[in-house]
Amino acid sequence: MAGNPKPPRLWRDVVLFDGHDTRAEPMAVVVEAGHISRVMPMTELDRDVAAGCREMGRGGVMTPGLVDCHTHLVFGGSRADEFEQRLEGVSYEEIARRGGGILSTVRATRAASEDELFAQARPRLQALMAEGVTSVEIKSGYGLTVADELKMLRVARRLGAALPVRVITTLLGAHALPPEFAGDSDGYIELVCREMIPAAAEQGLADAVDVFCEKIAFSVAQCERVFEAAEAHGLPVKAHAEQLSNLGGSAMAARHGALSADHIEYLDEAGVAALREAGSVAVLLPGAFHTLRETRLPPIEALRAAAVPMAIATDANPGSSPIFNPTLMLNFACTLFRLTPREALAGMTAQGARALGLHERGGGGHGRVTAGAPADLCWWDAESPAALAYAVQPGRLRQRIFNGEVTHD
Ligand code: NIG
Ligand code: FE
């Protein structure tokens, strides 16, 4: 016979941000068997219920566990040298054209073993977790051969198995043109469609497929072929689009029912309308905006007016966003993009989950504090949810709760 089941766990008198809004009154949250069982105002917390629970915390702020819906945190090497070049005035695009940028990380990633990539990625992921991340998306895209892309995805899966965090993997084979296909980008897209996607799908290594739709990467037509291959293998799609120019990649992605269009500084009205129509999420990446010293803002007002869900992510990667700090992104989203703290927090919780298709998985509720949802939560030492975006102050996470278990206190 099994031992005594664990008593329900109770956090009481918390200021609750539920994934969309801050509740007006002090709240109680009860967790049982890995799920949130009850969420109620303190005035409704029955003495008997409280007596039957193990009290885990009192006061403070509770939010859903943070969802970082766009990262490239598995990679080899470093691009600190390019950081210096960019400070001297060389642009990100120019560095890419000279064979640096993504391709310099590709060389280092190909040269690294699976164990080396794992060892290098682990502390990056732990840095995200220490600031509240309970679900994270990890993209491939620095291998650009079938074997190296699968290697990256296996590392991402291993990270999810080794650490108390939910890892969602995305195959980003169409990230850059590898040197061996120079002058033959259609040939490379063939490889992505005919070999990479089928292999990743067969081995269960990819939860979604992404593309980089840009002049320095792949055309709208090429990205569409990748999406068709993904669809043939039952994989949802998303796109890096309208980051450096407006090619219409987001609208094409929306036509394919994309989970999200990401970056989108150059998105126009038609693109906004297409995202709204498709129910795709606009993923805003203020870390890349900041690092590249971009001046063109994503069309926040238009997205808001159209009620397109907006998510926020770190875009953690060695080039355009070497930033492994999710709460800093809450602040950047407000200061750089003029999101409200509420929008920024929703962007890293409920909307981030939506950008990963998590909101429909396993009974739903990911990225939200609601009865029946998986108990992925953060309990913070802060006076209000907005304070999490207001102050750039790492270290305020008192407890990180993953699947109902406290993993950080
Ligand atoms: O999200 N835009 C393309 N891909 C990444 C950057 C990757 C890199 O520079 O290594 C991004 O910004
Ligand atoms: Fe990215």
Image: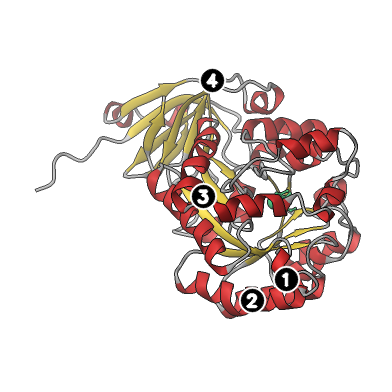
* Residue labelled with disc 1: 181
Contact, mark 1 vs mark 2 (Cβ under 8 Å):
yes
Eye-nearest disc, 2 or 4? 2
Name the residue rendered at 57%, 44% in the picture. Answer: 67
Label 2 CB sits under 8 Å from any ligand 1 atom: no
Label 4 CB sits under 8 Å from any ligand 2 atom: no
Q: Is residue 92 above or below residue 170?
A: above
* Amino acid bearing label 2: Leu
Q: Quadrant of the C terminus?
A: top left
Q: Examine the rendering and report whether any part of residue 338 can be seen.
A: no
The earlier-in-sequence mark between 2 and 3 is: 2
Eye-nearest disc, 1 or 4? 1
Q: CA distance from mark 2 to mark 3?
A: 34 Å
The earlier-in-sequence mark between 1 and 4 is: 1
The earlier-in-sequence mark between 2 and 4 is: 2
| Percent of width and height locating residue 119 | 46, 42
* Residue labelled with disc 3: 366
Name the residue rendered at 88%, 41% in the picture. Answer: 90
* Residue labelled with disc 4: 381
Residue density around tag 3, few if under 14, some if 14–19, many if 20 or more, within 10 Å: many
| Foreground of the two, 145 or 215 | 145
Q: CA distance from mark 1 to mark 4?
A: 52 Å
* Amino acid bearing label 4: Asp
Instruction: Give the label on residue 30, or none.
Output: none
Q: Is residue 112 left or right of residue 277?
A: left
Q: Is residue 320 left or right of residue 192?
A: right
* Amino acid bearing label 1: Phe
The earlier-in-sequence mark between 1 and 2 is: 1
Residue density around tag 1, few if under 14, some if 14–19, many if 20 or more, within 10 Å: few
